[in-house]
Image (cartoon, helix red, strand yellow):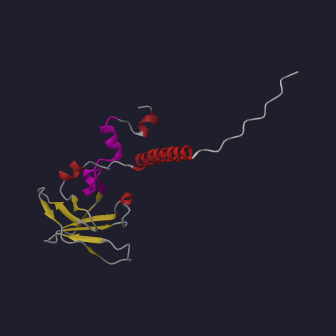
Amino acid sequence: MSKPRRPPKPIEPLTARQKRDLKVTGIILLVFVGGMGLVFAAMLIWNDPDFPREIAESTPHSVFETDDGRPGSWEYLDESLEVHPLGECVRIDGWRNQRPWQCTSADGSHVFTFRDPGGHTGGGFQDEALTVDGRDVPIECTLENDWDALIYCAPLSAIPTPEARGLAAGRSSPGQRRAGR
């Protein structure tokens, strides 16, 4: 015959010190896990600029934000790569929040138009356009990855395509990998 089982020991309630230590440990773990989650989420949404600022700095008809704010202060490069300020930006016709901004140079030769999505930094600009002496110059704008996060724009003709950027960095494009090149 086996030994009779002893009744289990009753569970003692936690002392005040044990409760406090348990709360502190829980808070520390929560802060750590939350912080790691934020870091991971930031890494997922962090995106490099579409093209380096050096391209814009060496290309005529590039546009640069010089002062953050809405709509900010802007400058442009002329044909001889001299920097000139664009005048005060004003809202032009359109719906209340969808009205584009328009910045015009002092001599009227450069007109920069854009729609700001209203504080959504990840959204970037929309419908950016540059008109130089009456002709449209297709441009693309991107955001710097530094603390100031200023925007700069360059003509599309100066920006390498994503495939060319990948090849320049020594990587092959997905189409080349599939073709076995």
Residue 20 appears left or right of 174: right
| Residue sitting at x 38%, y 49% | 46
Residue 44 appears left or right of 113: right
* Residue 119, x across and y down, in percent: 36, 65
* Residue 45, x across and y down, in percent: 41, 50
Please identify the quadrant where the C terminus is shown: top left
Q: In this rendering, is residue 72 above or below 35?
A: below
Q: Is residue 165 magenta?
A: yes
* Residue 118, x across and y down, in percent: 36, 67
Q: List the single residue furthest toward the top.
A: 1
Task: Identify which residue, 75 or 146, lies in the foreground.
Answer: 146
Q: Is residue 1 magenta?
A: no
Please identify the quadrant where the N terminus is shown: top right
- In which quarter of the view is residue 5 placed? top right
| Residue sitting at x 46%, y 36% | 178
Q: In this rendering, is residue 87 above or below 14?
A: below
- In which quarter of the view is residue 80 placed? bottom left
- In which quarter of the view is residue 4 placed? top right
User: What segment carries the magenta color?
Assistant: 141-170
Q: In this rendering, is residue 40 above or below 177?
A: below
Q: How many marks?
A: 0
Task: Identify which residue, 123 or 61, lies in the foreground.
Answer: 123
Task: Identify which residue, 52 or 121, lies in the foreground.
Answer: 121
